[in-house]
Image: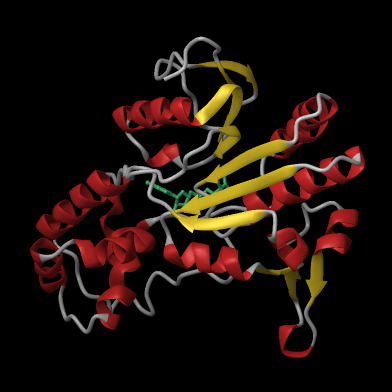
């Protein structure tokens, strides 16, 4: 997780407002209904910690008061509640074999075939590292092909805080260790003075990406279909029905024979008939099975 979105659980456990069982169950059920994120029984202290800052900023002195407010008028609070509860851990070139597959198999094949339009989606992009990694890989493939391509990466998340960090594109230098040296030199500007130890993404790379808030459980405004969808380490928090519904929606939003990448501990086994497993957590849309 980048320093920009790092959140201390609480200043001190002693000072933290207690979250009672009934209030926990209310919030847990609401979070599940609105985001698909499942919090087990052992996550009560975690949620209590994550929401302390939110209660303080709303000047509320108890979780009972917070729950009453949310119960009476949930909408204005949903984005902040879901932001507080989401886990945004990520890093550049995470599960690098996925980016190798894209760089060595998919992009050369498509570019050699004369494709002029490419659409990629980082669904659950957290603080942006996945989307910037995709942009570095995509830009290099397009540049090396010498072709002119209309290429765009849509990067979405439900967390406002994470998206702010993604938009800012500023990371700690020690978070760049997995970025190959040539790409680090090309795409990151080292901070000086007060910004020593930071690195900012160059605007030319940022131009390949459109960051947007989107809750995967709500309506998707996108019209076109994607060649590639990365949805990694997101459905890990969803129950089976939530995963099944999401995979079925992805099938409707992906090109025939398009590719869906999941996280290393995630699987579609028994949850979708629309995709074939073709590599390590890499799925291909099955032709003739368009949703
Ligand atoms: C652990 S991060 C994964 C980031 C990145 N994909 C990776 O693999 O490194 C999971 C992200 O999914 C987002 N997320 C969880 N539920 C979501 C939902 N219903 N809609 C959109 N984003 C969601 C969280 O906000 C979080 O930023």
State the image coordinates of residue 123 (x, y, percent, origin top left).
Answer: 51, 44
Q: Quadrant of residue 219?
A: top left
Q: Is residue 93 visible?
A: no
Residue at figure coordinates x 61%, y 27% from the top left: 259
State the image coordinates of residue 179 (x, y, percent, origin top left).
Answer: 79, 53
Q: Quadrant of residue 113?
A: top right
State the image coordinates of residue 223 (x, y, percent, origin top left).
Answer: 47, 40
Quadrant in which the N terminus is drawn: bottom right
Residue at figure coordinates x 54%, y 39% from the top left: 232
Furthest residue to the top? 288
Residue at figure coordinates x 57%, y 48% from the top left: 154
- Of the pair 182 and 14, the residue shown nearer to us: 182
Residue at figure coordinates x 78%, y 90% from the top left: 193
- Of the pair 247 and 11, the residue shown nearer to us: 247
- Of the pair 190 and 89, the residue shown nearer to us: 190
Q: Is residue 191 visible?
A: yes
Quadrant in which the C terminus is drawn: top left
Q: In the rendered picture of this protein, how many numbered marks are placed on residues?
A: 0
């Amino acid at each position: 997780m980048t320093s920009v979105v790092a959140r201390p659980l609480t200043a001190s456990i002693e000072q933290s407002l207690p979250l009672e069982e009934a209030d926990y169950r209310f919030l847990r059920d609401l979070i599940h209904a609105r985001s698909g994120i499942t919090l087990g029984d052992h996550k009560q202290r975690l949620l209590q910690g994550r929401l302390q800052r939110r209660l303080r900023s709303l000047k509320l002195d108890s979780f009972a008061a917070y729950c009453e407010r949310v119960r009476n008028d949930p909408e204005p609070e949903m984005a902040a509640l879901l932001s507080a509860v989401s886990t945004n851990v990520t890093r550049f070139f995470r599960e690098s074999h996925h980016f190798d597959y894209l760089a060595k198999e998919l992009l050369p094949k498509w570019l050699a075939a004369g494709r002029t339009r490419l659409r990629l989606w980082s669904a659950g992009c957290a603080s942006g590292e996945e989307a910037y990694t995709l942009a570095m890989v995509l830009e290099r493939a397009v540049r090396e092909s010498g072709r002119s391509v209309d290429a765009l990466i849509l990067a979405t998340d439900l967390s406002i805080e994470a998206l702010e960090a993604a938009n800012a594109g500023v990371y700690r230098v020690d978070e760049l260790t997995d970025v190959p040296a040539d790409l680090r030199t090309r795409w990151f500007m080292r901070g000086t003075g007060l910004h020593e130890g930071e690195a900012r993404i160059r605007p030319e790379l940022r131009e390949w990406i459109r960051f947007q808030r989107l809750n995967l459980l709500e309506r998707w405004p996108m019209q076109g279909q994607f060649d590639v969808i990365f949805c990694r380490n997101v459905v890990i928090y969803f129950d089976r029905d939530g995963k099944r519904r999401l995979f079925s929606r992805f099938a409707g939003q992906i090109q025939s024979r398009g590719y869906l990448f999941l996280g290393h501990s995630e699987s579609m086994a028994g949850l979708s008939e629309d995709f074939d497993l073709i590599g390590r957590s890499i799925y291909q849309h099955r032709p003739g099975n368009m949703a």
